[in-house]
Image: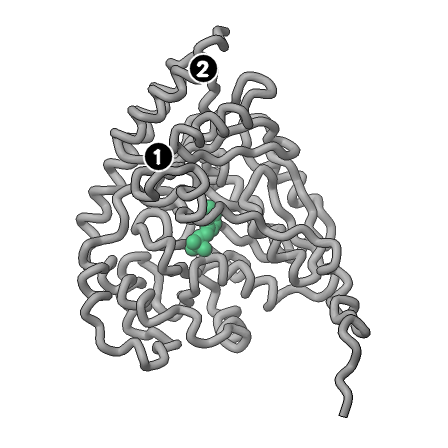
Amino acid sequence: MSLPTAGARDASRLVRRHILDMEGYVPVRGLEELAQELGFPSDSLIKLDANENPYGCSPRVQLALASAQTYHIYPDTDMQQLREMLSSYVGVGAEHTILGAGSDELIDLLMRLFLEPADRVVICPPTFDMYRFSAQAHGGQVVSVLRREGYSVDSEAVLAVEDAKLIFIDSPNNPTGVLTSREDILRLLAADAVVVVDEAYYEFCGQTVAPWVPEYDNLIVLRTFSKWAGLGGLRVGYGIFPLGLVEHLWKVKTPYTVSAAAQIALRESLADLERLQDRVQAIIAERERLFQKLSSLGFLKPIPSQANFILCGTPQGQGLRIKEQLKQRGILVRYFDRPGLSDFLRISVGRPEHTDALIEALREIGAGYEQ
Ligand SMILES: *Cc1c(COP(=O)(O)O)cnc(C)c1O
């Protein structure tokens, strides 16, 4: 028997057409790899580029993970007990909630549930790029309705999009930190489409529409433990869904995606709410201090934020240079240069000492940009 000649077949021609020329999602780079490149020990880098929690996860999570004995058993997929615990935190019945490996999994699940080829998904840039990425990966057609001056959602323009199936609004918005008003969300709910309100940063602002879900059959709220509870690396997110969708979502969800470790982390975080909420308060206070400091530099234009990061305009054409110079000093921030967001820096709120180091570095870098 002879083997086929190498290269005689090209499996890539079998890839679905719409995937061939789609753009992937660009994640932040791994910490170890970056530290090595920069020549810093990874624990001395000041990581303000991915809205992670600078206080880490609850110490209860670390203790419980170290002593658990059941990692060889497939995790519970229904998670009834955890969903009951979560339900008292959220204030909406457990029957409305589904957990995922981060809310990213639930975004993907919604596309899987709803999209026929070329179905329309409305996003409001600047916004979280996962909506575009997931929609395109599932063959959807992304319709962008740019935010208005001041980054509020142009709800009339969104409602004017014909045949929209899904509308994604992150509130507070990533990367601007701007909230969408309850009035605007109410207005959008009149659409003949599903409105997904992504409240990944809810704990940093306190405004939610989760209690509305049982009353609107087209409202979905997504949340995550990645930011406020410091579980980004363990992947725990959840959605609050109208009952009419829940059974269909369960049908298409891959089982076992929320690992045994993630389930332990969720349980222990909910059991340590007071400590985690104190940390959220510290981050909110630090956000206000960071905002004042950034404004007082004189060359950056920070936007008031309701989340755990601050978006800053930069002196024209200087954003990338500032980001690189911070990086050389071991401080990581996110740089954006896209339509509606040209030459901006997004800086996550760290601990007070991170703010101090950042501001000192920016003073050095910025000397010379008087304006
Ligand atoms: C970080 C973020 C998420 C993703 O959270 P995971 O639960 O870690 O997948 C979702 N939406 C927005 C707007 C985010 O910024």
Which residue corresponds to the image point at 39% horizontal and 44% vertical from the top-left?
201
- Residue type indicated by callout 1: Val
Q: How many marks?
A: 2
341 relative to 84, above or below: above
* Mark toward the start of the polypeptide (2 vs 1): 1
Element type where label 2 sits in the image = helix
Determine contact: label 2, label 1, CB under 8 Å: no
Determine which quarter of the picture holds residue 102.
Answer: bottom left
Q: Residues within 10 Å of mark 2 (few under 14, many from 20)?
A: some
Which residue corresponds to the image point at 45% horizontal and 23% vertical from the top-left?
302
Q: Residue furthest front?
A: 2
Which residue corresponds to the image point at 60% horizontal and 57% vertical from the top-left?
134
Nearer to us in this view, 266 or 47: 47
Residue 142: x and y in percent read 68, 50
Query: What is the image's colouring?
Result: one colour
120 relative to 327, above or below: below
Cβ of mark 1 under 8 A from ligand 1: no
Residue 199 appears in the picture as rendered: no
Residue 145: x and y in percent read 66, 40
Which residue corresponds to the image point at 55% horizontal and 62% vertical from the top-left?
108
Quadrant that contains the N terminus = bottom right
Element type where label 1 sits in the image = loop
Q: Is residue 23 left or right of residue 210?
A: right
Residue 268 appears in the picture as rendered: yes
Nearer to us in this view, 331 or 148: 331
Q: Residue furthest bottom?
A: 1
Distance in Å between CA atoms under marks 2 and 1: 20 Å
Residue at the disc numbered 2: 366
Residue at the disc numbered 1: 349
Determine which quarter of the picture holds residue 50.
Answer: top left
- Residue type indicated by callout 2: Gly
